[in-house]
Every structure is written in C-alpha cells, then in structure tokens.
Amino acid sequence: MAKEKVSVVFDRRKKAEQAGVGYVEVQIYLSRSERKYICLGKCTPEELDVFLSQPPVKEEIKRCHDCISAMSLFRDSMTISNFDIYYQGIKDGNGIQECRNSNLKTDFVAYMKDYIEKEHVSEGTRKHKFCTLEAVKRFGKLKTFADLTSKNLVLFDTWLHDGTREDISIHTYHKHLKKITHYLRITDMIPTDPYTQVKFSRGKSKERRPLLEDELTKMRKLKLDEKTGNVRDLFIFSAYTGLAFCDVMAFDFETMTEHEGKLFYIDGSRLKTGTQFFTPILKPAMEVLKKYHFSLPKISNQKANDYLHLIQAAMKLNKNLTFHVARHREFCKYQTTNRLNCLSI
C-alpha cells in the first residue's frame, strides 16, 4: 500500500500526557529517509477535531497537498529542499498573490506554447500537444488567463465536436489543456481551475476496419506514380513490421537492426511511449527496404494520409484508409504466426 504523502500527526514527541497539550503537525513523507514536519499549533487531545476543522489549518494542509501534486506533475525529486521551494512559492506566491489581477491579462496561447516547449516529454507527445495548441488558437476564445472559465471550456468542447474529430481525440485535447490549467491553479496564477467545475465524457473510440491479407496483396500490386507509390510502400512496411508512422520515419537500418539466422530484426523503442520492441522484418517489408536501398523515403503524416485516400479510391475500398490502420489489422495474426515460425527456425 502506498505511503500517504501528507498526514496530520498529533503529539509526535509524546508530551501531551505530561503537559496537557501536544503539538499538531503536518507530516510530509518525501522518501524513506526524508520527512518534513510543519507545526500547525498545539491543543489538547479533546480539542484536536475542532482544531483541525479551522479554515486556516485546513488551508495549510491543502497547501502541502498542492506542493506534492506540483512536484509529482513536474517529476521533481521528492526532497525537502525541493518541497521548500514549492511551499514558499505557493504560500507567498513570490509576489504572485499581489499581481493576480495583472496575471489574468497574460497571453495564454503564448504561455501554453512556452509550457509545451519546455516540458520533458517525447517529441511525438510534444507534437500532439502542439496540435492542441493549434486548436486553441483557431478556437480563439482562450486568449488570456481570464478566458480560462468553465463556460469557455464548454464552448471549446462544442467547437471541437464539429464532426472532424473522434471523441478520443477530443478527450486528448482536454487532457493536454487540463494539465496546464491545473499547474496555473496550484501556482496561484489563476483563481480556480475551470476543469474542476465541468466534466467532459471520454466518449467511445471509433472501431477501426483493418486491411486483410488479400487487400494488402492487392495494394502491393497497384501501379502508381512515384509519390503515391512511395506512400504505398511505407504503408506496407508499417503493416509488416507493426511500426507507427513516426517510428517508420525514424527507422535507420544501420543502427536499428540485428541479423539472426535468416532474418533481420528491428531492435528499437517507440518514439511516443519509449516502449522497447524487437520485431522481425518479414519478406514484404524487406522488399520495400531493398527497393529504396535501405533508406525509406520521408514525408509528413498528413501528406501520407492524403495519398492513402487516393490509394483507397484506386482500390475501391469501402474502408477509410489512413496510416494508423496499418498497425491495427487482422493481418497481425498472420504476422504473429510468422514471427513464431521464424523464431523456431
């Protein structure tokens, strides 16, 4: 069971029995070797419940919880020195409390851009967060800190539901935005976090219709112009390796493959999640690599999907063809069987 980070301790020094009163302290558990204690005052054992119900005492306990939340949010080390920095910043605001009204005039779009650029995340995640930023810009009603209200969030959610985005994508936009508003609140830069006053449903993910093996074979045989053919080949490579688009773009044969037996294997990690993978390069994927002399063509995800729509029309598919479909297909069952067979050779 996880140790409670913030708790109230009464009479830690065991002097209440002799003196009649004991000190009430907030215990901040930072690690096995580091604990910090903040004195709230003293009272008798009988007065403890009343003492803890006082607004200033409750506010002080909340402040400690906020410090721990902020440290976790920014992955700062749980040390007393780091806690003291957050504690002093939230307690006296380093002048923030005095300029709260001027803070509300701060350019939120510029702040959000700076926040994303400085955040310690993978480049794939950063790219998704910049998509959220672009949506905020186009929406146009979240310009300053003062615009961060529950009413405007509802309007933003309605604007996002214009039929061009799936529910899961919209939920991700809110998740990115909520992290920033939460930080603004705990650092006292805005009076309230608007997401505490409104809740948005996650919705349901749209069922993907993957390509079958015969459809992939048909795609491989299509006669296409150079640029469309390049995208087709990238799609085939993704379908037979299971790599996401960003990982295909980052693929380097010289540094990311190992030769074992009759097969080459890709040994790498996903850009988005950092998850390690070790996957065989099956024959169709190897044919693509040989065609391009082991250096795959480069293209943006948006352009690739535009060309895939042309391929979809050429194949007369009644499925929406995007690069993401390459990794979510029933053909993966066939690929898994091949992997097992290859590993047993």
Image (spheres, rainbow, N blue to C red):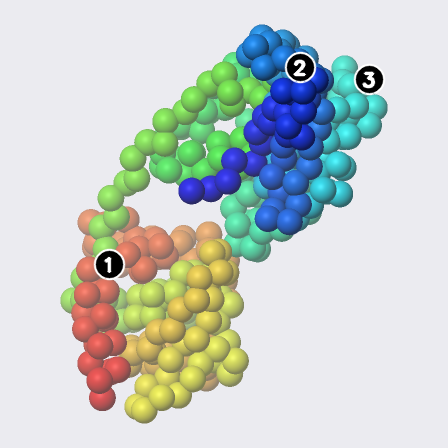
Q: Which residue is mark 1?
A: 329
For the residues bearing labels 2 and 3, Cβ distance under 8 angstroms:
no
What is the crowding at mark 2: few (fewer than 14 residues within 10 Å), some, or many (at least 20)?
A: few
Residue most extreme to the bottom: 261
> Considering depth in this image, is 30 or 305 the residue closer to the camera?
30
* Residue 114 seen in render: no
The residue type indicated by label 3 comes to: Glu
Q: What kind of element bears circle 3?
A: helix
- Residue plotted at (46% across, 84% down): 293
Q: Which residue is mark 2?
A: 20
Q: Which residue is mark 3?
A: 98
- Residue plotted at (76% across, 15% down): 101
Give the image location of residue 68, x and y in percent. 62, 35
* Residue 288 seen in render: yes
What whole-number distance in Å separates the C-alpha atoms at marks 2 and 3?
Answer: 41 Å
Q: Quadrant of the C terminus?
A: bottom left
The residue type indicated by label 1 comes to: Arg
